[in-house]
Structures are given as C-alpha cells and as structure tokens.
Amino acid sequence: MKDFKYYAPTEVVFGEQSEEQVASLVKKYGGTKVLVHYGGQSRFVRFAVNVMDIPNDFTDPEGTALKGIEAMERFYHAIGMPINIKELIGKDITDEQIKEMTRKCSRNYTSTCGCLKVLKAEDMEAIYRMARG
C-alpha cells in the first residue's frame, strides 16, 4: 500500500430526536451532502464535507450508487489498495476455489451471513465471482 494520511474526525450524536440536529451539524462542518442510513429501529445520519462530488439523483439511485462505487475504487487504487481478489492475491481464482471459500464462509453450507440482507451460499458464491476481477 502507498503511504498516505487519513484524518477523519467524528462527532457522534445519540438520543431521541437527534436527527433534528443534522442541519446545524452539516453547517458547523461545512458539509454539502447528507447520507441517511436506516436499519431496524435506528437510523444513522452521515455527511461528507466535499470529499466526493457525486450528485444524488433520486430518479436513478442505482446510477448514483455505481458512481459512488467507482469513486471508492479510484480512491483505493490511489492509495495502492486492491479492489478485487485478483489484485489482492496477484492471480486468478478458479470456480472450485470460489466454491471452497463459499463452503467455509457458510460453515459447510449450514449457515447464512448478513443482517441487512441474509446471504445464502449462492449469494456468497455470486459475490466471490463478482470480486474475482
């Protein structure tokens, strides 16, 4: 990995109606974009201070997400981090190796993983195939 500095000060606000503080916090830190995460009974609000200029097109959420992924891949490459398995280990992996990773990750096909979307063995295998590079 290339040398780099990463500075990420964080202010975390908890409690009832804490989302009402979003506007003042965004203004306080000079933010321009807000990302709201919902999950279960809670929600998390995050904002970036002009880190990436990715317009959020609410009519094309998939396109916006793909632009975000591309921006992260550019950032990872800029600091020398791999973005797929081939870049990580320096060689292609076979379908049999993918099946073996899936078997281990799913505890011999008896377990799922994930809490936002439960991943079954076939989901894990598809993710490994996409990450092959």
Image: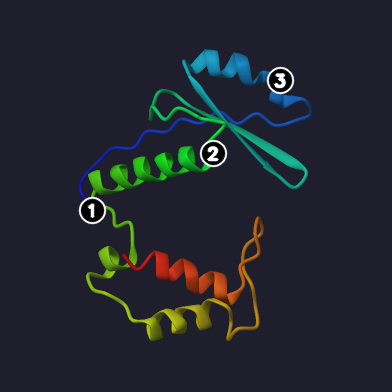
Q: CA distance from mark 2 to mark 1?
A: 32 Å
Q: Is residue 125 left or right of residue 51?
A: right
Name which of mark 1 and mark 3 comes first in the sequence: 1
Q: Position of residue 45 (x, y in %)?
A: 61, 32
**Residue corresponding to mark 3:** 20
Q: In terms of sequence position, does the residue under pointer 2 or pointer 3 come before the other?
A: 3
Residue depicted at 55% across the width and 18% down the height: 26
Q: Secondary structure at mark 1?
A: loop
Q: Could you tell me how far apart the alpha carbons at marks 1 and 3 are, in whole angstroms?
A: 40 Å
Residue at coordinates 20% horizontally, 48% vertically from top-left? 2
Snapshot quadrant of residue 71: top left
Is residue 62 positioned above or below 36 on the image? below
Residue 37 x, y percent position in the rendering: 63, 39
Amino acid type at circle 2 is: Pro
Q: Secondary structure at mark 3?
A: helix
Which amino acid does the dot numbered 1 rest on?
Met
Give the foreground label among 2 and 3.
Answer: 2
The answer to whether the residues at label 2 and label 3 have Cβ atoms under 8 Å apart is: no
Q: What is the three-letter code of the residue carrying label 3?
A: Glu
What is the secondary structure assignment of the residue under circle 2?
A: helix
**Percent position (x, y) of residue 113?**
62, 68
Q: From the viewer's perspective, is 11 left or right of 13? A: left
The mark found on residue 30 in the picture is none
* Relative height, residue 65 to residue 98 (above, below): above
Q: Residues within 10 Å of mark 3 (few under 14, many from 20)?
A: few
Question: Which numbered mark, 2 or 1, is in the foreground of this view?
Answer: 2
The residue indicated by pointer 1 is 1
Neighbour class for label 1 at 10 Å: few (<14), some, many (≥20)?
Answer: few
Camera-nearest residue between 67 and 52: 67
Mark 1 or 3, closer to the camera = 3
Residue assigned mark 2: 61
